[in-house]
Amino acid sequence: MTAPKRASQIELTATSLTCERDDRLLFEQLSVHVANGDLLQLVGPNGAGKTTLLRLLAGLNQDFDGEVLWAGEPLQQVYAHYAHQRLYMGHLSAVKRALTPIENLRWLTSQWNVADDLLWQALEEVSLAGYEETACQQLSAGQQRRVALARLCVCPAPLWILDEPFTALDHYGVTWLEQQLERHVTGGGAVIITSHHALQGIHSLRQLELGSVHS
Amino acid sequence: MSLIGATVKRDLLLAARNPGEWANPLMFFLMVAALFPLAVDPDPSFLAKIAGGVIWVAALLATLLSLDALFRADVEDGSLEQWLASGESLYGMALGKALVHWCISGLPLTLMSPVLGLMLALPNDAYGALILSLAVGTPILSLLGAVGAALTASVRSGGLLLTLLILPLYIPVLIFAASAVYHAGIGMPYNGQIAMLGAMFALALAFTPFAAAAALKLNLSR
């Protein structure tokens, strides 16, 4: 199943980003530009600031120096619009253990008003058919991760910001997610991702190395 | 707006799946009323005098019991982060959460209170005042409590801190509400106290979600 592709303009530009955490310089004078068709992978050792940079690009963290622009406007000024255009998935999956996959998915996508039958299809897509009525606490960690990932199939946002999405996925899950990423960027979307996983065979992959400016 | 609705729906569903969440405070409420006459004095004329106060103290403590978890789970599992990422107002989120909290704590307490009144020999004239004061007063408890719960959401074992923060703010509500029930019981007018509670409710409704939203943002910006 393919998500309906839209030709929305993606233009996320960050210039001269500097960020400190606990007196430790994470990155300095960093510039990032993401446009349609880009797949940007943030790499670096643990604690290098990948998640910090990701949250900052997602507009969730304003504790930094520098500028982040969405379509030429400061992010915080167009945040309501930006929030609809990008999907943010943190390493916390926001899946409630007492609820079933479909109930969780309804909440996770409620911002975009996705029709229910598309959500059922999305669960099928992530191999959770047959588990729709099982509480998530009875699912494995990988299956819970799939519940969270299922929204990639139905979410209309052109920019995806994903923090370690490969965690806990099995071999098939990894292949599936790679296909999703590729399909999304070839369809004109863009992805910013942190992962230690080597993304192979994706044409437009760029990597940004963090952790080289330790003071 | 859709996310607020979805969250209210999801939280009510969660409460339905975990009955302990709302049944526990309710049982506590019932226990206090059941044990009080045993421990103090079962004489109805004595109980009639203190019934309103006892019921209100029990309601207040039962509310405190259920407050601690209001935002903690959402902070820990990333729901709050998703909310912030959605660009919807945190004001709406705080208001929605307070509403859900009232539905699973204040509302059952209000509905159950006549039974407690019966157990504590509440004067017949005071039932109206009891239900009215709880119906107006418990939403104030939920709204004020949401601020405290938001402030302590990422503090480990923040329950004590929450109690210390919120209890002083609950005292005016307790004083006016208990006084309304008492005055109704001795046949005096109680509209003044109810009007005060109504004013407090209006104030809390307008301002506490701002405070709770600001506190939630504080939890997330690290």
Image: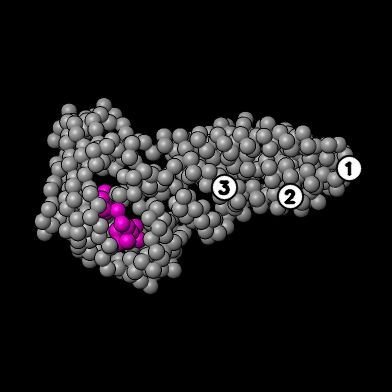
Report whether residue A46 is seen: no
Specify which label sits upstream in the sequence, 3 or 2.
3
Residue drawn 13% across and 35% down? A212
Identify whether A21 is placed above or below B10: above
Identify whether B15 is placed above or below B190: below
Amino acid type, mark 1: Ser
Q: Secondary structure at mark 1?
A: helix
- In three-dimensional space, the C-alpha distance between marks 1 and 2, rounded to whole angstroms, equals 19 Å
Q: Position of residue B106 (x, y in %)?
A: 64, 47
- Badge 2: residue crowd in 10 Å (few <14, some 14–19, many ≥20): many
Specify which label sits upstream in the sequence, 1 or 3.
1
Q: Secondary structure at mark 3?
A: helix
Instruction: Check disc 2 and report the residue beneath it.
Output: B113
Task: Count the labels in the image.
Answer: 3
Instruction: Check disc 3 and report the residue beneath it.
Output: B99
Residue drawn 23% across and 49% down? A9
Chain hosting mark 1: B
